Amino acid sequence: MVKKKMTMNKPETASDLLKTLRESLLELQRWGYKGFDCSSRSLEMLKRWSQPYEKPLRPKTDINLENIKADLEGCKRCRLSRGRTQLVFGQGNSKARIVFVGEGPGYEEDQSGLPFAGPAGKLLDRIIAAMKLNRNQVYICNIVKCRLANNRQPQDEESETCLPFLKRQLAIIKPEVICTLGACATKVLLNTKNPLGRLRGRFHDYNGIQIMPTYHPAYLLQYPENKRATWEDIKKIMALLGLPL
Ligand code: URA
């Protein structure tokens, strides 16, 4: 057998050493040497041992709404950041069975830091009270977290940029029902272009969570004749949650 010269660089870490050892054993195995433990089992073991140590990912239980909020601190991911006084992240119970999702903060919300703080919010409070619940028992948030000037709707790009954060909020809260308020929230969460009129009044699946689209309270203030239909939608949610009428 022709003797071959094995070149070896000086290993710097234990991991390097194990890697080098494995490579050497492999080489010996190829040359047909016996008397060393260059069995496949040992080589596989050395391979595993020489993997660099990786810090374990943050355990899932550590992730909470505060972490997500912290990830949004100083957010400049879209142009809406330029018009905000503060982020309006969301309000309510992190274990809520129902989450209400609106479009985005207006002036009052931008000033207070709380969602649905203006006249539309007062109506939403009445809807929640009619369910015999209050703001501490539900969770309220929006598609976008920064002020929409002049009550305009979020543009696609703005919704898409902010949506991952809402999805993370929903993944933490894991509600049984999401009530989308208005066309914007409904279309964004259901990823559809269908009009609200065709979507509201029945449940839709969102990752195993039931979505009930209904009218936006600001729209109801303008067109109160739709309050009755909204109440019918809310009653369906109450039935699903087993809440007394
Ligand atoms: N206030 C909010 O927080 N969201 C809306 O969609 C409207 C008003």
Image (spheres, rainbow, N blue to C red):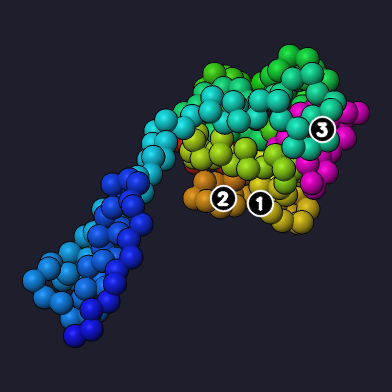
Where the N terminus falls, by quadrant?
bottom left
Whichever of callouts 1 and 3 sits on the residue coming sooner in the sequence is: 3
Chain part drawn in magenta? 143-158
Q: Is residue 224 magenta?
A: no
Q: Nearer the viewer, residue 95 or 194?
A: 95
Residue 45, how many percent across, how many down?
21, 60
Amino acid residing under circle 3: Leu
- Callout 2–callout 3 Cβ contact below 8 Å: no
Q: Secondary structure at mark 2?
A: strand
Side of 78 where 32 appears, left or right:
left
Q: Is residue 195 above or below residue 177?
A: below
Residue 212, how many percent across, how many down?
62, 44
Amino acid residing under circle 2: Tyr
Callout 1: 10 Å neighbours few (<14), some, many (20+)? some
Q: Is mark 1 within 8 Å of ligand 1?
A: no
Q: CA distance from mark 1 to mark 3?
A: 23 Å
- Is label 2 or label 3 in front? 3
Q: Which quadrant of the structure image shows residue 115?
A: top right
Side of 190 where 96 appears, left or right:
left
Q: Secondary structure at mark 1?
A: helix
Residue on which the image places disc 2: 206
Residue 227, how many percent across, how many down?
75, 33
- Callout 2–callout 1 Cβ contact below 8 Å: yes
Residue on which the image places disc 1: 190
Q: Secondary structure at mark 3?
A: helix
- Is label 1 or label 3 in front? 3
Whether residue 226 appears in this view of the structure is no
Kindly report the secondary structure that dominates the magenta region of the rendered protein: loop
Residue on which the image places disc 3: 80
Q: Residue at x 69, y 19 (%)?
A: 114
Q: Nearer the viewer, residue 171 or 9?
A: 9
